[in-house]
Image (cartoon, rainbow, N blue to C red):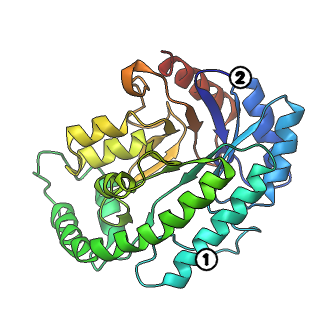
Amino acid sequence: MPATQILVSSRVRPYDERGAKDVADWAAKAEAHGGFVALPWPQVALAEVAVALAAQGLPLVGVQLPLPPEPLPQGRRVPYWASLEDAEERLAAINMANETLARAQTFGCTWAFLDGFSIKLKAPSNLFAQSYAERRWDRDRASKVAARPLLEAALIERKEHDERLCDGARFSLERLASVAEARGVRVAVGHGIGPWQFPSPREVDLLLEEFRGGPLVKAHLPARLDVLETMGLLTPERRAALTLAPFVLASDAVGLRDDVVPGLGPAPLASKLQQAAGKPPAVVVVSGRADTKPQELAAAVAKLAALSLP
């Protein structure tokens, strides 16, 4: 096994009759080390991807949590694992995550990724996202439109919910840690971008401190860290700590979205990927949009392989 496993996420292709074969074929041609199944792909896709990868001599290594059993109808979403108001939704999310891991384990998966989720606040996130995407923003707090006040209002409102969100997250993470440990899977916990998402990098630090030494670990999300730093919401110390995570979700950010493969965004990933003491990350997942081209994916895999060298 290589020091770093570079995996191709299913997100680079749509979930259709050719999706699984394309993911496997492209991964093999790009000389990646395996595959990773992520939303919006469902649990039923795990077998399709595993079989297609096996035909190329590659393993299915990881999965996002939770995946729905079947494709979701348009407008539906998976349950949120730290839902602000609904304990039943939190429990449904962990049950769905357990089902996902049970299926994934039959194909030898050893890694999982639990991502953050969106929170609705009174300060409209769409207006802020539009201002950010149109470059009407700067890191010197001299924005000449309403983007800065929107962000500050959202931060104030978000603080009112922090304690309840973290309490709900502990409820879910305690159960997920037990499930993951029993199944021999490591779970990387991701963070969001800004106050309209949960958890923040600070909240990930706070929550995972309670599970130190267990199967739950931090995730390094380079594109999101760049955006948070631009917004002035990330300290250098916290960024440095997150870059040492064993799991990397690699993509480039476009506006407030981290959804193009590395090398295609306006601020491409260029920093060396490593854990403490210069050790390379255990897993690097190449993620992007469903319209990614095979040559773009191959270039991203080669770039990440170079950045992951010890």
Amino acid under disc 2: Glu
103 relative to 175 in the view: left or right = right
- Residue drawn at point x = 76 percent, y = 24 percent: 29
Q: Tag on residue 92?
A: 1
Badge nearest the viewer, 2 or 1: 1
Q: Secondary structure at mark 1?
A: helix
Amino acid under disc 1: Ala
Q: Tag on residue 31?
A: 2
Q: Residues within 10 Å of mark 1 (few under 14, many from 20)?
A: some
Above or below, comparing residue 85 to residue 223 in the picture: below
- Residue drawn at point x = 80 percent, y = 46 percent: 107
Residue 267, x across and y down, in percent: 37, 34
The quadrant holding residue 128 is: bottom left
For the residue pair 278 and 171, the one nearer the viewer reads as: 171
- N-terminal of the two: label 2 or label 1? 2
Above or below, comparing residue 136 to residue 242 in the picture: below
For the residue pair 158 and 129, the one nearer the viewer reads as: 158
The quadrant holding residue 273 is: top left
Q: Quarter holding the N terminus?
A: top right
Residue 39, x across and y down, in percent: 63, 58
Residue 286, x across and y down, in percent: 58, 37
Instruction: Give the total of numbered labels.
Output: 2
